[in-house]
Image: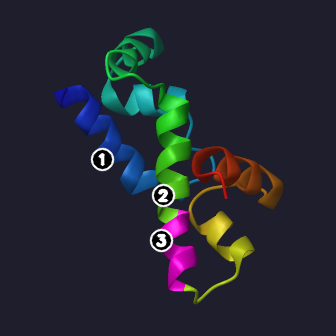
């Protein structure tokens, strides 16, 4: 649980980085990719799902604030293109 919490904090801090990927997360935590995947599996998710979920959650907050465009928000939370953002947002929220 401690390692999972650490991973969540790192993703929260770095989610705006479009190059944040699972391998980089494992490196930052000083773990092999397989070990990181095991930590996530024990918590019922995957590293990629966590990254996507946290990005969409933050985007949803920003969208509800209503002060910026969807495109700007998508880029601000780390999505590299608007279509990728729309698919992820729909998958996570159903909206």
Q: Secondary structure at mark 2?
A: helix
Q: Which secondary structure is most common in the magenta stretch?
A: helix
Name which residue lies at 41% across and 46% down.
11
In percent of width and height, residue 71 lies at 74, 72
In percent of width and height, residue 35 lies at 37, 11
On screen, residue 52 versus residue 89, left or right, reads left
Q: CA distance from mark 1 to mark 2?
A: 14 Å
Whether residue 6 is visible, yes or no, is yes
Point out which mark residue 61 bears. 3
Label 2 environment density (alpha carbons within 10 Å; few <14, some 14–19, many ≥20): some
Q: In the image, which residues are magenta?
A: 59-65
Q: Residue furthest front?
A: 94
CB under 8 Å between discs 2 and 3? yes
In percent of width and height, residue 44 lies at 39, 22
Name which residue lies at 38% across and 53% down.
12
Name which residue lies at 69% across and 51% down.
90
């Amino acid at each position: 649980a401690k390692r999972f919490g650490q991973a969540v904090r790192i993703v929260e801090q770095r989610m705006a980085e479009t190059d944040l990927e699972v391998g980089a997360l494992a490196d930052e935590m000083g773990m092999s990719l397989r070990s990181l995947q095991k930590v996530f599996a024990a918590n019922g998710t995957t590293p990629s799902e966590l990254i996507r979920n946290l990005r969409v959650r933050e985007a949803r907050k920003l969208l509800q604030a209503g002060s910026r465009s969807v495109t700007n928000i998508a880029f601000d939370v780390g999505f590299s293109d608007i279509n990728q953002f729309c698919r992820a947002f729909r998958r996570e929220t159903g909206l």
